[in-house]
Image (cartoon, helix red, strand yellow):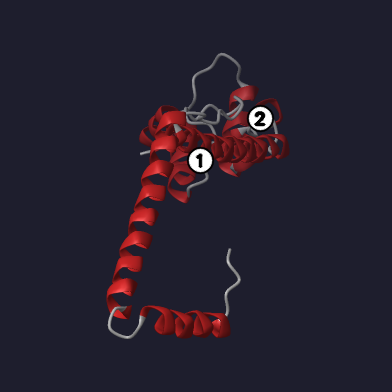
């Protein structure tokens, strides 16, 4: 603001010492300091009153809220774009028909062949026990159907909400 260097301050101090004298110089400096303090407080009070009158606190708060809202909108758009790219890269539910159970287990293929040979007839005890053994083998090996309800030819249903995900997890257990 004022471009006063060290040399200028020394000249002012020497002139003040010569004009005021050494006896009254401390008192004059004290008075000058009090006046500068009062001037600074007056300017600060005036500035705060003007800010209150025009509502600067509200304006600052509103600008901050707008900045926060813009940041939230940007993050939301990024999340939506990432979600959309994930959904586009994943195959659709109609493309994800699980393969038949017979293709997964040779034992089940044999049982299905026997059933197809004798339509309408009940399974023999050997075939029924073989079917149970094959199902137990599938269950114990972890090679279960992809669908939550273990239906072999139904499309995979992906849970979209937290409640659906929790229900699917409980069905698996």
What residue is shown with label 2?
97
**Quadrant location of residue 34?**
bottom left
Please report the residue visible at 50 percent of the width from the left and 79 percent of the height from the top.
12
Q: Tell me: residue 92, above or below residue 130.
A: above
Nearest the viewer among 137 and 25 is 25
Q: Looking at the picture, how far across and down is residue 143, in whole percent? A: 52, 45
Q: Residues within 10 Å of mark 2 (few under 14, many from 20)?
A: some
Residue 9 drawn at (x, y percent)? 51, 80
Nearer the camera: disc 2 or disc 1: 2
Name the residue: 34% across, 73% down. 29
As helix, strand or loop, the secondary structure at mark 2 comes to loop
Where's residue 81, x and y in %?
A: 67, 37
Distance (Cα) linking label 2 and label 1? 14 Å
Q: Residue 79 appears in which quarter of the rendering? A: top right
Which residue matches tag 1? 144
Pick whichever of labels 2 and 1 is earlier in the sequence: 2
Label 1: element kind: loop
- Is residue 37 shown left or right of residue 70? left
How many residues crowd mark 1 within 10 Å: few (<14), some (14–19), many (20+)? some
Q: Residue at x 40, y 84 (%)?
A: 17
Q: Are marks 2 and 1 in contact (CB under 8 Å)?
A: no
Residue 125 shows up from this direction: no
Mark drawn on residue 28: none
Q: Is residue 118 above or below residue 131?
A: above
Q: Nearer the viewer, residue 3 or 83?
A: 3
Work out which quarter of the rendered image holds the C terminus and state it. Answer: top left
Of 116 and 74, nearer the camera is 74
Residue 147 percent location from the top left of the image: 53, 31
Quarter of the image that includes the N terminus: bottom right
């Amino acid at each position: 603001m004022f471009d006063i260097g060290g040399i200028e301050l020394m000249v002012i101090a020497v002139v003040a010492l010569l004009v005021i004298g050494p006896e009254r110089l401390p008192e004059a400096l004290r008075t000058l300091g009090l006046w500068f303090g009062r001037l600074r407080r007056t300017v600060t009070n005036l500035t705060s009153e003007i800010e209150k009158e025009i509502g600067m606190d509200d304006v600052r708060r509103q600008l901050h809220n707008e900045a926060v809202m813009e940041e939230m909108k940007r993050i939301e758009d990024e999340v939506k774009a990432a979600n959309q790219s994930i959904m586009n890269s994943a195959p659709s539910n109609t493309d994800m028909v699980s393969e038949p159970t017979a293709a997964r287990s040779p034992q089940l293929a044999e049982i299905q062949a026997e059933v197809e040979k004798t339509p309408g007839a009940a399974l023999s005890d050997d075939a029924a026990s073989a079917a149970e053994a094959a199902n137990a083998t599938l269950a114990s090996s972890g090679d279960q159907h992809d669908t939550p309800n273990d239906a072999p030819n139904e499309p995979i249903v992906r849970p979209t909400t937290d409640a659906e995900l929790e229900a699917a997890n409980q069905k698996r257990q």
